[in-house]
Amino acid sequence: MVRVKIWGSLRAMTDGAEWVEVEASNFKELLDALVEKHPGLAPQIKRGVSLSLDGVIYREAWFTKIGPENEIILMPYMVGG
């Protein structure tokens, strides 16, 4: 199981839960498990989200390995320059 912090406005889609635990070994499995557990996240995940893994922000890094020792944060898609 991995523990995921749900950031900001995405919490409304997890019934206000700040933390969610799911079974996943990479980002793709994580997103699929989150949608299964909280279907309200599906539209946002389809539009795009960013994932922070130990302080590094990723987007579309589907097969990046994750484990229970990692700090994982799900947030709305981040853009920047």
Image: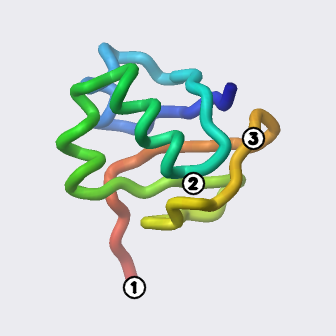
* Relative image position of residue 29 (x, y in whole percent): 52, 42
Instruction: Pick whichever of labels 3 and 1 is earlier in the sequence.
Output: 3
Q: What's under tag 3, amino acid-wise?
A: Gly
User: Along the horizontal axis of the image, is 34 left or right of 62?
Assistant: left
Q: Which mark is residue 81?
A: 1
User: Which of the pair 51/35 is nearer the observer?
Assistant: 35
Q: What's under tag 1, amino acid-wise?
A: Gly
Q: Which mark is residue 52?
A: 2
Name the front one of labels 2 and 3.
3
Seen at 24% across and 38% down, the residue is: 42
Q: CA distance from mark 3 to mark 1?
A: 29 Å
* Relative image position of residue 7 (x, y in whole percent): 43, 38
Seen at 22% across and 27% down, the residue is: 40
Residue 24 placement: quadrant: top right
Q: Secondary structure at mark 1?
A: loop
Callout 1 crowding tier (Cα within 10 Å): few <14, some 14–19, many ≥20: few
Q: What's under tag 2, amino acid-wise?
A: Ser
Instruction: Pick whichever of labels 2 and 1 is earlier in the sequence.
Output: 2
Q: Secondary structure at mark 3?
A: loop
> Marks 2 and 1: CB-CB under 8 Å?
no
Seen at 61% across and 28% down, the residue is: 23
- The residue carrying mark 3 is 67
> Marks 2 and 3: CB-CB under 8 Å?
no
